[in-house]
Image (tube, rainbow, N blue to C red):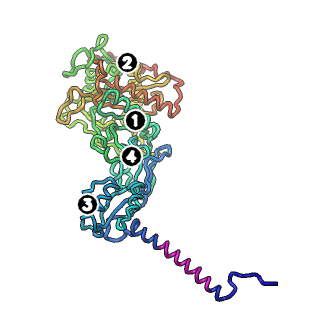
Amino acid sequence: MLSKLKLFDSDSLKLLHRRVFFSITIFIFVYFISIYRISSIMLFPDLNDDTTNYIKKDIRGSIYDRNGKIIATSIESISLSINPNKIKNKKELANKLGLILDLDIKKIEKKLLSKNKFVWIKRNISPIEYQEIINLGEINIQAHKEFRRIYPYKNTLSHILGYVDIDQIGQSGIERYFENDLSKSQDIIISIDTNLQQLVRENLLKTINYYRAESGLAIVLDIPSGQILSSVSLPDYNPEDKSTYNNNNLMNRVFQSNYEMGSTFKPITATIGFDLDIIDPQMTFDVTKKYLNISDHDNYKDNGIYDVEKIIVESSNIGTAQIATRIGKKNQKEFFKKIGFNKKINIENKESSAPLGNKNNWGKLETATIGFGHGFAITPLHLVKAYASLANNGNEVFPTLQINKQFEQKQIFNNKESSKFFINLLNSVVLKTEYTGPRVKVDGYSVGGKTGTSELLNPNGGYYKDRNLTSFIGIFPTNNPQYVIYTAIEYPKKETGTKQRMTGARVNAPLVKDIIINIIRLFNISKDENDDLLKVDTNFLYRKLNATV
């Protein structure tokens, strides 16, 4: 029988085949190494020498909201650099790069004429631009893997998150405050609820547009924890688009802007008097005539003899000024210090401002006017902190953007009934006012609050006579305070065809109502089972004094 034919039928043929196979393998290996090296030289050179100013960084940590949603993160991107000394036809290359990368050709040409060994052409280019650069075939263009910061919700969280520069360094907001952690690839979780933030921003933007206002703000704070659930300042900006950066857009009005808060100070003033046992809820005050040349916007009702509750419900400057005078400058300043009106709030934002307070003389007249929110400026965050603390049984609330941050308890009140007194005043405003109550009341839920209307400060001195800040601050629900909601609108314009004054009752109360309804729906809050608190009279605990000032 003939033996089967074998591929290698001799030692010499076997050796020849092996050598050919080995040579082909080596050729293919060298070929791919060469292609890789050419690509590397062109697109991914070694940049760890002293001829460049490029330093490779670790990926930046991501930022999450309280529900685990990514609200800021980094992705890989490509940036282009070049050694101008290696380019021969600089003008021609400048023209090509300008067309591909949508850059000013003269600026590119100026870079190519530089004597430096390393210049950036463009950072964070698009995939389409990158492919066209590859097609260009210029081996002296170097591509670097970098990271680009993206913000999935764009403008919605801009004033909270802030933004980073081209080198991924935080410039404002959370990005700046937690720079050390984020730059080390550590993730951050903040207290903001993105779902609520979107709804609040929509409500605020709708109000601003309707009244053709210049700007506005809104904040929602969780009272027991101090956590800020939503904070919106409009106009805002897109952290990914530098063209939207300007001083007006970048201003975080919740944390940075100082305003005279108007009538929102009145319940605070009354509560100071009560807590120090200086006034009694049944005391009466004559508001029929000016006091220290202070007048009211509206005519007095009935006989003009108001008790404390009626002073707050009718928002009487004259009545509040008399209460403030009884309290006195010393007590007023000491209580303001207790609620934090004397210093910057320690929050996770390095741009937040200290209150301007009263930089002028603080005499008897100033004590009176400060009592109703005129002549003393604070940030919206300061006002929210104060209301939260007074509603929290007098336990100081510390606003925060972090989850599970612990604070040392500090009691503000001397009288354990002071918090109840404060809340009852806010309830009365909603239940007993002719205009404010119906605009903010939510059926089945206990809501308390106070309007504010004040003249805007003129940067050139004094006040604008035709420009107001309208506001409303609410506590919800008042039978178990959980949330403070504050909104303010700068310079709302009158509705076409009407002569009605732009006030907090007209502009802001409906806005706060919409926000409360969104909170109820989003957090699935049940209606009040017991509305006894809504029927409480602020006078029920106290003896009748009938003291008329």
Query: Which quadrant holds residue 100?
Result: bottom left
Dot 1 surroundings within 10 Å: few (below 14), some, or many (20 or more)? many
Q: At label 4, which amino acid type do we have?
A: Leu
Q: Could you say where residue 196 lies in the image, as x and y percent from the top left?
A: 45, 36
Residue at far top of view: 303
Residue 109: image tag: 3
Query: Which quadrant holds residue 103?
Result: bottom left
Q: Are marks 2 and 1 in contact (CB under 8 Å)?
A: no
Residue 161: image tag: 4
Q: At label 3, which amino acid type do we have?
A: Glu
Residue at 41%, 34% in the rendered image: 200
Q: Could you say where residue 131 lies in the image, as x and y percent from the top left?
A: 42, 58
Quadrant of the snapshot with the N terminus: bottom right
Residue at the spot of label 1 = 201
The earlier-in-sequence mark between 2 and 3 is 3
Q: Which residues are magenta?
A: 16-33
The earlier-in-sequence mark between 4 and 2 is 4
In this rendering, the answer to whether 14 lies above or below 359 is: below
Front: mark 2 or 3: 3
Residue 62: image tag: none
Residue at the spot of label 2 = 433
In this rendering, the answer to whether 395 lies above or below 47 is: above
Mark 3 secondary-structure assignment? helix
Overall secondary structure of the magenta section? helix
Q: At label 1, which amino acid type do we have?
A: Arg
Residue at 37%, 38% in the rendered image: 232
The earlier-in-sequence mark between 1 and 3 is 3
Q: Are marks 2 and 3 in contact (CB under 8 Å)?
A: no
Mark 2 secondary-structure assignment? loop
The earlier-in-sequence mark between 3 and 4 is 3
Q: CA distance from mark 2 to mark 3?
A: 69 Å
Q: Is residue 38 magenta?
A: no
